[in-house]
Image (spheres, rainbow, N blue to C red):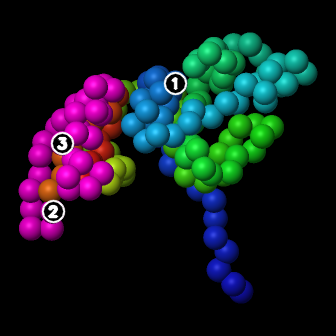
Amino acid sequence: MPLMTLEWKVVIDAADPHAQAGFWAQALGYEIEDNSPLVEHLLGLGAVPEAVTTTAHGRRAWLDLAAVRHPDDPYDEQSGAGRGRRLLFQRVPEPKTVKNRLHLDLHAGPDRIEPEVARLEGLGAKVKREVAEQGGTWTVMTDPEGNEFCVS
């Protein structure tokens, strides 16, 4: 039987999925997914209540979910959901309490680490520590909700 590839996304728990989507869209140069056509359609059918929706980034959205996708990747025009490189933020009630078991590495290149770190700090990220090892150097940062990521 031939090996079948799978589509995937990284799902990140968040206190405020829309703020996280805004940060990561700016950090990565991604687009915030526009789910408003699907949300409006389902509201019009009475299939979902108003209480599960909100207005975010100037359009109707799901209250507890927000996603960002690479601008060059395909997406479903009816739902707005990306079919490529994608981060989905889902609201959870509990706060982050321990180090992430999974994190993103952003590759800026050795000459661009410092300016990229400064840009990300301007978006709300914080520097956690600088690392210099035999294999290279990188900066460990946290996003506005404390999730770790690295810039190298």
At x 88%, y 18%, the residue is: 44
Tell me which segment is drawn in magenta. Answer: 108-136
In the image, farthest residue toward the front: 111
Task: Give the foreground label among 2 and 1.
Answer: 2
At x 9%, y 56%, the residue is: 132
Q: How many marks?
A: 3
At x 46%, y 23%, the residue is: 19
**Label 3 environment density (alpha carbons within 10 Å; few <14, some 14–19, many ≥20):** some
Instruction: Please say if 5 is above or below 132.
Output: below
Q: Nearer the viewer, residue 7 or 125?
A: 125
Where in the figure is residue 93, as x and y percent of width and height? Answer: 46, 24
Residue 132 falls left or right of residue 34: left
Q: Which residue is mark 3?
A: 114
Residue 82 falls left or right of residue 101: right
Any mark on residue 136, and which?
Answer: 2
Quadrant the N terminus occupies? bottom right
> Tag 1 or tag 2, which sits nearer the N-term?
1
Task: Give the foreground label among 3 and 1.
Answer: 3
Instruction: Please say if 82 is above or below 134.
Output: above
Q: Which residue is mark 1?
A: 18
Callout 1: SS: helix
Label 2, label 3: how far apart the Cα atoms are:
14 Å
Q: Amino acid at mark 2?
A: Gly
Q: Is residue 116 magenta?
A: yes
Callout 2: SS: strand
Task: Give the foreground label among 2 and 3.
Answer: 3
Where in the figure is residue 96, as x and y percent of width and height? Answer: 34, 32
Q: Amino acid at mark 3?
A: Glu
- From where the camera sits, is residue 117 visible? yes
At x 17%, y 38%, the residue is: 128
